Each structure stands twice: as structure tokens, then as C-alpha cells.
Image (cartoon, grey):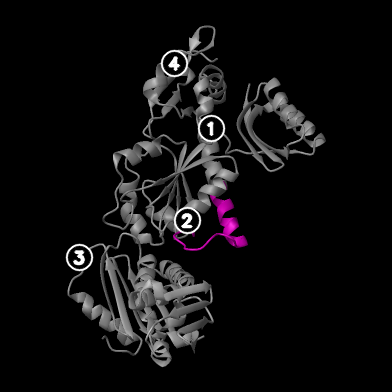
Amino acid sequence: MILVPVTYNGGVYRHNEIMDFIEDIGGYIVQKHILASDVVLLCFVPKDDVELLRSIAKSMGGEVVDSPLVGTEIAVVSMSLEIHHLPHPSCDIAEYLRRLGAKSNMVSLARGVGKRIAALNDEERDVINEHDLAVYLMGNFEKCIDYKMPNLRRGIEAPIVICGGPNKETLQRIINPPVDGYVGNVGRFMHRTKESEEFTKLDEIISEITRVLEKKRIGDAKDPLSVSPARLMDLIKENVPKIHQVTSPTPLTVQMAGLRVKLPYDTFASEIRNIEIEDSVKIGDVSNVTPSRMRDYILIRILPFSDTNVVV
Amino acid sequence: MQAVEYFEVECPEMVGGEYYKKITNIVLLDHNLIRTLHKIHIYVDPGVPIFVAVGILHKTPSLIRVRDFAAVNPLEGKIMLVLSNETYLAPMLKIFWQRFGQEHVEQPDRFTVILKGVTIDARELEDVIVADPSESLYKDLIYAFKCIAPEGFRIRREFYTKEKFFFVASEDTLTGDVDALIQSKFKIMGEVMP
């Protein structure tokens, strides 16, 4: 069963029926937002039933839109936490990603600034690698990007999309070896993105990220995961009641090939490993339950079929 | 409003220079500093790397005295001040408390202050200096240039007089050649380094 990421936008009235329907057809709700009288459901639904969901949603005055970023966790890598990079453009881009369904985290580097002095430490490297994709927000100067990029990408295994002041062709020329995506003319700026051409630029970033993630999905499909991350999310919700007491907006963050569980590793890791998925196959059998570098969270990395020989 | 007569950003990288012109403009506007500047020249070279900002200021506003924002009315045994705006109310009250004591200063509402049992003459009270706008101006100007300069340029040198200023920043130690560089940037504007 192929699950596709979609977003449902509708009213609060009878939205429970939509939720029940998604669960009945074997779909999963990743996130639910209630904003005044509107409901936004970020979900995965079986590919064959998307049209059916669309028609039911229409009858209730809602709509279903394709959201390729649902179920992805993206790191927005800012060179520092200072006013030079925050809130614009780092927060603008992170917020735009969030609107389109991605779970975006800001990763601000301790020593990402300058040219000669720019560096990436092991904690930053590991945190970035825990994401599905990293968006690097660089500055305006070609020389600086050229000089510091080798330092800032050392050890990064997640796909990288670079945003920088020079145009796309220049970025492609100066970054060697090449990264996965480039968006030019988005360097450092000190004002809020509110003009139409700035929104076009944000859309360009989204389409570049979508392209890179789609490419990754196609690559991963050759060796499918042993279990869907969304299914693991549902299982943990059912079997670990403590997760309902976590106040974080996403206590369980679904990734493309894993899941971040916002519970302490030492207390809950073995309990999660022993949850049975199906036919005595446990979570620990089909995934690596590891401590995350982000606080004391748990990071579950699902193993591919070639490693486990099971698909549940 | 007095306009900026000269505003240039010089950079070996054309695209980077354009971005920095935009950044400078926005930061100076956001900090309400554009009207204080008469001429400004910025030089950024990421190759060195160095950031130099030199400029000429408009005549700074004079000292703010009590008479500039309040009407002083001497009454029997007290002096009543009626404020036209409350921008300088806080520093004025601070000065009065220190000078006359809190028990002699009353504030029945936002725009009225009454001094009771004080020996000061009304004329003398009108001349009391409440604030010096130039003090915060230079502080604001330097802060704005810290925001404009590329981040990571933490080795800084700044200098200002009432008319001219310069701000230099780099991530490397500033050498003696910097003086010649600053001088040349003042020269481009037709001015002499202070």
C-alpha cells in the first residue's frame, strides 16, 4: 500500500468524520491543528483512496491538497542566532516550510559566521544529520561561501539545499563537490519577506526542496522500509500513554525514514523497542532505537527491507 | 527632513555590494538614523576581509532643556510644569528627584508636574538640561553599523566626533594600513579624515 502525504483544510464542524474516514481507509494523521473555526490535518492516505477523500472533503466544504513536505523533518541551518540572520531570512523560510506541512527546526551554528573562522562542531553535525534535509542559509558574498562551505558541510550526510546571495549558476560553480539543491539570490537581508517577488523566491526554495526530497524518496523506494514511520507513530501513541503528556507541538515527529520521539531515552527506549508491531515483530527488530543529539529525545531509524527481510 | 547627500557602497563583488546597499538603507531607516547622516561611504571586501564605513553627520540636535517641552508656571509656594510631550518626562523627573528630593516633586497626571517648596527661580528651572540627544545618537550609530557589517567581523575600531565618524570591522587583526584605507574613503567623499 503506497501512502501519499496530503493536507486536509476544512471547518471544525464534522471534521471528526474525516478523521475517522482517514483511519478507516488505513491512513495516518501526522498532525492536527485547530485554528479558530478551521481544521488542518496533515496526513498520509493510501494513494488509491485520495480521490475518494477529496470528494468526501468537498461535500463537507473542505479541500484536500497534495503536500509533499508532510512527514519530513527539515533543518534550517542559520549561521548564527544574531540579528544578522534572525528573524529574517531564517525564520521566514522556516515558517514557510511549516505552513506547507514540513516540521522545520532551526539549527543555528555556534561558529558559522565570518569566512576564515567559520566551523561546524560535532553536535551541530549530528543534529543536522538527524534530519531528512538541511537548508543552508548562506550570506551574500561569493568568496565567503566558496571559502567556508567545505568546513560547514564536513560530515553532513543529509541532502543539502544551499540558499545564498549570488545567483544559482554562481553557487553551482563555486560549490565543489556539488550539493543536492541550489537557490540563488536569497542571501542575508534585514527585512520581512512581504513583496510578491520575495514570496516567489520562497516558493522557489520550496520547489527545490520538494525536488530533492522526491529524488530521495525514489531512491529509498528501491529498498523499501520495513515499516511505515506513520504506522510506528500510531503504535507508540497506543502503547506509550506518557506521550500524551508531552507538551511539545509534535511529541512524535514523523520523518521520511524514521521517527523522533520526544520522551527521555533512558526511561522509554526499551519499552519502545519491545512494542509488538505484528506477528511478534517488535519495533526493535525493524529499527534502530537510538538516543538523539537533540535534548534527551529518542530517534528511531527504520531499517530497509534488505536488512530485516520483513515488511510489516 | 534633511536628506543624505552621498550614499555609496563599494565592493569588489557587484551582487554583494548591491545587497549591502539595501541592508544599510533598511537598517539606518529602522533605527531612524538616516536623517542624521549627511554623507556615507561603505567599503566591503570579503577577500581581505574588511568592512569600512565612513560618514559625515548633520549638525546634531542641541541639548534638551525643560523649556523645550514644558511650560513653567510659578504659583504661590509652588511651580507647575505643563508638558507638551512626555518623551523626556522620565529623565526630567530623575533630575528633579535628585536635586529637590522626591517629597518636593508631585505628578498629578501624565502631563503635569508640580514642584512644592523649592527655592529655584522659574527662569533657572527652564534652563535645566534634561537630555543630550548626541549621546544616544553615537551609540545608536555604532549599533546600526554592527548590524550592517558582515557577521563574524568581531575585531572593530570605531571613532566619532560631532561631525565625522568611521567604523572598521574585520575577522582578522586590523593592521596599520587601515588608516590609509579610511583616509582614502573620506577622500572619495571629498572630505578629510578626522
SS label for mark 1: helix
Q: Residue at x 56, y 49 (%)?
A: A96
Of pointers 4 and 1, the one earlier in the residue sequence: 1
Q: Are marks 4 and 1 on the same chain?
A: yes
| Residue A282 in picture, x, y percent from top left | 48, 12
Chain at tag 1? A
Residue B173 - label: 3
Q: Are marks 3 and 2 on the same chain?
A: no
Q: Would you name the residue on which mark 2 appears?
A: A87
- Label 3 sits on what residue type? Thr
Q: Is residue A204 magenta?
A: yes
Q: Which residues are magenta?
A: A183-206
Q: Is residue A38 above or below residue A220?
A: below
| Residue A115 in picture, x, y percent from top left | 30, 57
- Label 1 sits on what residue type? Arg
Chain at tag 3? B
Q: Residues within 10 Å of mark 4 (few under 14, many from 20)?
A: some
Residue B124, image quadrant: bottom left
Q: Nearer the viewer, mark 3 or mark 4?
A: 4
Q: Is residue B111 visible?
A: yes
Chain at tag 2? A
Residue A271 - label: 4
Q: Is residue A230 magenta?
A: no
